[in-house]
Image (spheres, rainbow, N blue to C red):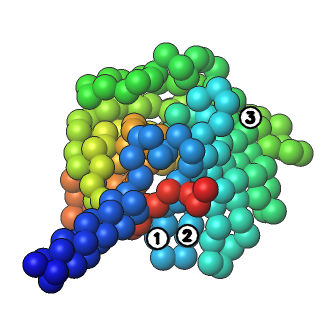
């Protein structure tokens, strides 16, 4: 009987320890960490629907980003420079995202000592729902195609963000989707910030 009790205690401890490493919507409200080799990102919700992300890189200087709802970058700061993306529309109207939703938002990109030469456009298309795993943790994500264009309509960048609304974070990006060159660049582990 004692062996069974010890076994049950060990199993309960292992399950609790494993569960404690996964970030849920409640834990996300106080902040969490996403990591992949060479990159550690600390996510903290702040005022106005923004999420502050402190990125630490193995081979580069640290960077701070502010993302609206954890998805749309509006400010970036590092020792290599500063960048603000000022939306020319109300980002609040885009959220909560739902499968099938599409939107287009114009931005003006501002950086010190560089005058803006035109607007940029972000097109969002929510393609559907998926499940994405980080270590032993599974998250419900929305596949959000993001396409950035210059004022002339030329595509500057395009990828699919695997966005976890419960966390307010993109867990991965899928590039060259649907081609033989398709690749996924994403975080590998998640954990709550230490209290």
Q: Is residue 189 left or right of residue 9?
A: right
Looking at the image, is mark 3 or mark 1 earlier in the sequence?
1
Q: Position of residue 129 (x, y in %)?
A: 23, 39
**Residue at the (62%, 51%) spot, across then down:** 53
Look at the numbered discs 2 and 1 and tell me whether their residues touch, using CB distance below 8 Å.
yes
Q: Nearer the viewer, mark 2 or mark 3?
A: 2
**Residue at the (74%, 45%) spot, across then down:** 83
- Residue placed under numbered mark 1 in the picture: 36
Q: Position of residue 88 (x, y in %)?
A: 64, 20
**Residue at the (66%, 56%) spot, across then down:** 54
**Residue at the (46%, 21%) spot, across then down:** 94
Q: Residues within 10 Å of mark 3 (few under 14, many from 20)?
A: few
SS state under label 2 = strand
Q: Residues within 10 Å of mark 1 (few under 14, many from 20)?
A: some
Looking at the image, is mark 2 or mark 3 earlier in the sequence?
2
- Residue placed under numbered mark 2 in the picture: 39
Q: Position of residue 125 (x, y in %)?
A: 34, 31
Distance, label 2 to label 3, CA atoms, is 33 Å
The answer to whether residue 177 is above or below residue 26 is below
- Residue placed under numbered mark 3 in the picture: 117
Name the outermost residue toward the front: 1
């Amino acid at each position: 009987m004692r062996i069974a009790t010890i076994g049950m205690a060990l199993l309960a401890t292992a399950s609790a320890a494993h569960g404690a490493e996964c970030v849920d919507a409640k834990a996300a409200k106080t902040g969490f960490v996403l990591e992949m080799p060479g990159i550690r990102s600390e996510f903290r919700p702040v005022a106005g629907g923004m999420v502050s992300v402190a990125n630490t890189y193995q081979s580069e200087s640290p960077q701070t980003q502010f993302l609206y709802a954890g998805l749309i970058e509006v400010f970036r700061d590092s020792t290599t420079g500063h960048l603000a993306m000022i939306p020319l529309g109300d980002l609040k109207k885009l959220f909560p995202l739902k499968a099938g939703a599409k939107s287009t938002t114009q931005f003006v990109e501002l950086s010190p000592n560089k005058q803006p030469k035109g607007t940029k456009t972000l097109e969002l298309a929510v393609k559907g729902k998926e499940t994405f795993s980080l270590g032993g943790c599974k998250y419900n994500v929305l596949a959000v195609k993001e396409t950035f264009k210059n004022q002339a309509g030329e595509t500057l960048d395009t990828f699919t963000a695997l966005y976890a609304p419960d966390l307010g974070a993109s867990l991965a990006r899928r590039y060259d989707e649907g081609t033989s060159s398709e690749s996924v660049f994403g975080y590998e582990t998640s954990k709550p910030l230490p209290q």
